Amino acid sequence: MTDREDDDVPLILTWDDASCGLLSEETESVPATNENGSGYDIVNNAVIPTPGPQDHRYHSGTLKQSWEMNYQEAAIYLQEGENNDKFFTHPRNPKALAAYLFAHNHLFYIVELLTGVLLMVLSLCEAPAVPSLRLDVYVHATLELLALVMVAFELCMKLRWLGFRTFIRHKRTMVKTSVLLLQFVEAIVVLVRQTSHLRVTRALRPIFLVDCRYCGAVRRNLRQIFQSLPPFIDILLLLLFFMIIFSILGFCLFSPNTADPYFNTLENSIVSLFVLLTTANFPDVMMPAYSRNRWSCVFFIVYLSIELYFIMNLLLAVVFDTFNGVEKMKFKSLLLHKRSAIDHAFQLLVSRQKPNGVSLKQFDGLMRFYQHRMSARDRFLTFKALNQSGLPMLSRKDFYKFYEVIGLKWKARRSGEHWFDDLPHTTFLIFKGINVLVKSKAFQYAMYAVVALNGVWILVQTYMLNSGFSWSRFVPWSYIVFLTIYGVEMLLKITGLGPLAYFSSGWNLFDFFVTLSAFLGLIALAFDMEPFYFVVVLRPLQLLRLFKIKQRYRNVLDTMFELFPRMASLGLTLIIFYYSFAIVGMEFFAEVVYPNCCNTSTVADSYRQINITVGNRTFLDEGYYYLNNFNNILSSFVTLFELTVVNNWYITMEGVTSQTTHWSRLYFMTFYIVTMVVMTIIVAFILDAFVFRMNYSRKNKEPVGDPEDENGIVFEAEVSRDEALATLELYKQTCPGGSNLNSLQGVLLSMERTGHSTLVYLGRRSRTKSDLSMKMYEEEIQEWYEEYSNESPVESHRHPEAQLNCPALEPAYQDVRQSTQSIN
Amino acid sequence: MTDREDDDVPLILTWDDASCGLLSEETESVPATNENGSGYDIVNNAVIPTPGPQDHRYHSGTLKQSWEMNYQEAAIYLQEGENNDKFFTHPRNPKALAAYLFAHNHLFYIVELLTGVLLMVLSLCEAPAVPSLRLDVYVHATLELLALVMVAFELCMKLRWLGFRTFIRHKRTMVKTSVLLLQFVEAIVVLVRQTSHLRVTRALRPIFLVDCRYCGAVRRNLRQIFQSLPPFIDILLLLLFFMIIFSILGFCLFSPNTADPYFNTLENSIVSLFVLLTTANFPDVMMPAYSRNRWSCVFFIVYLSIELYFIMNLLLAVVFDTFNGVEKMKFKSLLLHKRSAIDHAFQLLVSRQKPNGVSLKQFDGLMRFYQHRMSARDRFLTFKALNQSGLPMLSRKDFYKFYEVIGLKWKARRSGEHWFDDLPHTTFLIFKGINVLVKSKAFQYAMYAVVALNGVWILVQTYMLNSGFSWSRFVPWSYIVFLTIYGVEMLLKITGLGPLAYFSSGWNLFDFFVTLSAFLGLIALAFDMEPFYFVVVLRPLQLLRLFKIKQRYRNVLDTMFELFPRMASLGLTLIIFYYSFAIVGMEFFAEVVYPNCCNTSTVADSYRQINITVGNRTFLDEGYYYLNNFNNILSSFVTLFELTVVNNWYITMEGVTSQTTHWSRLYFMTFYIVTMVVMTIIVAFILDAFVFRMNYSRKNKEPVGDPEDENGIVFEAEVSRDEALATLELYKQTCPGGSNLNSLQGVLLSMERTGHSTLVYLGRRSRTKSDLSMKMYEEEIQEWYEEYSNESPVESHRHPEAQLNCPALEPAYQDVRQSTQSIN
């Protein structure tokens, strides 16, 4: 049952604690027999014993156990490489491992995320609550305490896994701990007093969310924002410097004019010019001076030219430049981190007998821990894809491609082209006809024409409607006609191309969902379901298809879709800033503005709500700005969005200021600067992504992500009958009774059915930004690798123990030494 | 008096028309003797006669004349290369040459520019004139006719120089001609009717200005804008498409709300969302819907996120990307054009005897035409700087550096370091002390401290002043103290560093002028000269020196100064757009808005001017927007600037619209889109320039333009006594009695004084963008040159006549052939 292979001894033994029972459940089924002879292998010119019958440490059960542990640690290294976790947080001993495994699975992550979200959502129900969601103090305080206990529990697990010293050194965790303690105290105080006090510290709650595993993208964004800050602040100071100079100047020039409320004191002058920086009070701020002396416009034109058109753009340029550099450095460090992780894992997977390669058995062992849901067939195919050297083992160079093949979806290469190839002849001809029709240029352009016609139709129809017409009560016949055409087109395409090919294109998916939702809307209308009417108004989105005609639009829209995840994470980052500002705003400015407040301020008009009688008509002159308040978290978010858009933001600022103190302006100005940072980062990000794509497609002389093309990473693996049989046999040995062997048997079955002795499998995945970067920086990457291998001696194959200079591995090394000593 | 050199025969004879008297004044002083023997040189395996006594075409007078013509044509080629004039406008015959020379000198250029400016300035005095500048119809129409006649004259010269066929093919000239004819007719009509009619065509006047030689930068900007247009328009369509979709949606959603004036018709809906694109009506546009249903804010947030934060940034990205490419292509074509010009010139300067090199005599001949104000010494030094090969002639490769050395300012390398080295010992020590002091870090930081203190002082002082205080009537003592310190610092620096070193730094110049103007302001105050008080308020600018401390600010400010010329030309381009729009605006909207107009519009408040009585106080509630009008060209410019800044632009639009038709909106929307294009280009330009500089300094691991450093292009030329003597002799022969030989004699004199037998001269010029680009694209430039030399066979030295494939040279070539045939 065991053969020679079974007795390969790991080069390095990890967590070499014989009393560790963690993995015993998995290994107890392996008989602890030991039938083989032993000998000595010469590694590193030192005589290291290979296990013999007299050595109890190396009877094959323990050996299996050791291998299993090595597999697990290698899998953890690879996961750390993928997630960009630093190796100093690597679990060092079986206890830490237990905590690590507990804290690293999706259930734990989800609980972590939910706790974070719960804490943030609580502010909907706390003191200045959304009316319909108001909760009693003891309810929300108890909920908060519960969530905080959850967070504390998570932190304990982390402490157990990291060890106290590493825990103390880990900055983010320490910040989290202190915020947690603070929140605990405050929550208890709230519970005791049964009333909320001024709790500005709630603004720190997003920390718990940001620290979640699933919020890694947000964390990265925040890091990038902080990295871009120093140059940003430099230019900001330049901006503020000019602002101060011009304020003094403006005060000197315009304060003699008593009709000018913008420059009558130095403070007003500074505030006016700060607001002018955002253009929000232009041209009003100029008007009193301009009406007095026409040449005073020169002051404002010069100020805006310098500040708005020059320095503000410089700000963008500086951030863009930094961003560019940071993106590349990030990519580099991620790449080298991954390589280092692969090096660590490789070292754990090779045996003393064959220190230069990883055999299928070891690879399979690794994969069982790394992606335990992967089928046996896919594990085997992944091994084949990696194995480029032709040897029966993976060399280190092969293994470096690990992260490139890990996400592949494997599929047997179809012999035929169409899904209907196997159907009877008549049916085949019909489908073939549809296929040709659907693929023809004429059909496509006819559809474009229909869509364009539809667009014009909608426009004309809407134009002819009376105002006040409610869309939902009347379905024009044209709507039904066009919808039928789209439906027929959709069906033709699905049948002609086959559902799989149809749905693999993003554009087709888009068509499908728009058409489907239009149909749903129609049904909803038929049943008079009012709330569905917004589905009906989605239909102009069909027109978006017209943009498929031109390459540039395809590029732009594809970039748009590609950017979407990153944009979403940036949006989330923005929301986190919003949250903190909303809490502070609510604590200080809740209920301060209301209709007809702020009568003493210059913006009283915007808050006025009076009945005006002109002639014999009476109407309500409504200044709606009292709606932009901080009365609850949702209103605060809308108000903050308005402040982000910047236009007329000073009306809100002045309104609140007139009801509180003039220090309130600090809040609004700070918020403006913070959003300016985030917005500049967003602009820099879009610029960078787009220019990168353009450069990429220029460099590689191919359009990126052309939806008609094969745009993905494809690996090929050819499987012969013998190989499949041998692998099946191997798997039966290593994990007998595993139900996932079916997949491998399936390969053999399909070989028999088709009568081929080999089968070719294709592994596909979509291209990621990292793939593009790999291609863009090809030459530099080689340099980086060389630098890296010069710095860390892990690379050298002949002296695997040299790797152990790497601090993370030292304990493991000591274990190995101890064990070899004990053998001697 | 003549030696062998004199009889070198040009390889190519240009404008070989013996009857050409154009140059006879310059050559008549050369005796037409012919004392030398002749022979045959073998060039191109063909026997070409060198002049002998029997050949009258080649007696040395005619020979000199031929050389002079060659020099002149070579100079013209080099000028064309420098100015990026295409070679198909190269003058072909002596008549064309006369016209060319007439039309290519600074006097002509200035007249051209003045005519263009006059035509534009006329609009100050025409119909809706600035009140104080109003002229009678017959006066300004006569002035206009005069200017147009001038333009016509210029065009005639151009026709004479280009020849009819080239003239017709030259698009810009044809457009100019047709506009000229139109303006002529209109001006005459105005004169006859003695009243101005609707003259929208005045908007075309900037064409005359743009076509000026001195406005080349503006022309380049316009070209760049037009080149960036296609991708811009694509994205703009996407933007407008989403706008239309959302308008339909908004109309459907919000038109049932009668209190919502923004979405009550489809047209209003489109206009509202167009304005929302500029954020100018946010959040007002949202408020009626938001007060009805809080969730309607989602519509606006989604719209702004897509349009403002995504597509608008995409627009910038696309323009930036195109801009980047266009800049590089422009640099490439300019570089190759220059190289081609040098090739042409080289061909004209080599002799039949030595077809591979240009001798000093020929180079000097060229330089007399190319830069006739250059002194003999500098011509010689330039030759030395070019001559890198060590041969007595310039090889083609040497000659390729022509444009790099042509702007050098030559100066003998000083033996000593300081300007006071030659002074007596005591004085020397004093100055040396000052020098050390001034250069010490302590002194610099002390000055920074003083400046910072001054800044705080000004701020505090201004803060303590009462409003309404007039700066000009009272000089605080602190002002005098600080000014004294600055004055002393300035004097110390000038004496310590020497005036030349002091003024060669831009920062010192800045200090000098700020301090000087502060002194002037003080004097002006002492004499109670009111208008000078703005000089006084300049003094906070001293604070700008603080930014010298940090490298990044130095970079930013240097970039700012470096960008200034280009920014100015972009500003001029913007003004040209403004002018055209201002004319159109004046023709249609002059005098349409006034106080209390527009009562029917939604923006009536901004135009209202009524006395309001609140309690017992009566005050004027003034809506100043009637000041933003098109009543004369100056007001129009201010109004257009306000529209450019965008904020509240819809108030002006709606005001004008309510007084005219709703088609007026087209004008404002078009203007918005045009300024958006220009502004995007400006942003892209600043981004590009800044990122380029950053990349450059990163690539070359040196800060660009560090003011303390030697930052310029420096060439060295060593002159020995013998060389100088020989050159002097040569010059005496070629242009006897030339007063500009003094400079060369000066070299000999200073050699005698110092006793050295050689003198080293340094040629310096500041680094231009082109130099930076040369360094940045080093590798690519080599490729371009190779491509170029493969395409055009001019490169090959052995077959100089192969160059004549170049169409521009063909006529000249035919002349040569004819002449050699006539000799045979």
Image (cartoon, coloured by chain):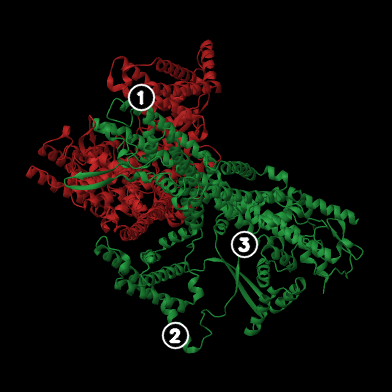
Chain colours: A red, B green
The secondary structure type at the circle numbered 1 is: loop
Residue B521 sits above or below residue B42 on the image: below
The residue to which callout 1 is attached is A537
Q: Are marks 2 and 3 in contact (CB under 8 Å)?
A: no
Q: How crowded is mark 1: few (under 14 residues within 10 Å), some or many (20 or more)?
A: many
The x and y percentages for residue A246 are: 35, 58
The x and y percentages for residue A228 are: 37, 52
In three-dimensional space, the C-alpha distance between marks 1 and 2, rounded to whole angstroms, equals: 86 Å
The secondary structure type at the circle numbered 2 is: helix
On residue A724, the disc is none
Q: Which of B373 and A516 is in front in this view?
A: B373
Q: How crowded is mark 3: few (under 14 residues within 10 Å), some or many (20 or more)?
A: some
Dots 1 and 2 on the same chain = no
Q: Can residue B156 be seen in this view?
A: yes
Q: Residue farthest to the left?
A: A193
The residue to which callout 2 is attached is B430
Q: What residue type is labelled 3?
A: Glu
The secondary structure type at the circle numbered 3 is: helix
The residue to which callout 3 is attached is B404
Q: Nearer the viewer, residue B660 or B341?
A: B660
Q: Residues within 10 Å of mark 2 (few under 14, many from 20)?
A: few
Q: Which amino acid does label 2 sit on?
A: Ile
- Number of numbered discs present? 3
Dots 2 and 3 on the same chain = yes
Q: Mark 1 lies on which chain?
A: A
In three-dimensional space, the C-alpha distance between marks 3 and 1, rounded to whole angstroms, equals: 64 Å
The x and y percentages for residue A46 are: 42, 55
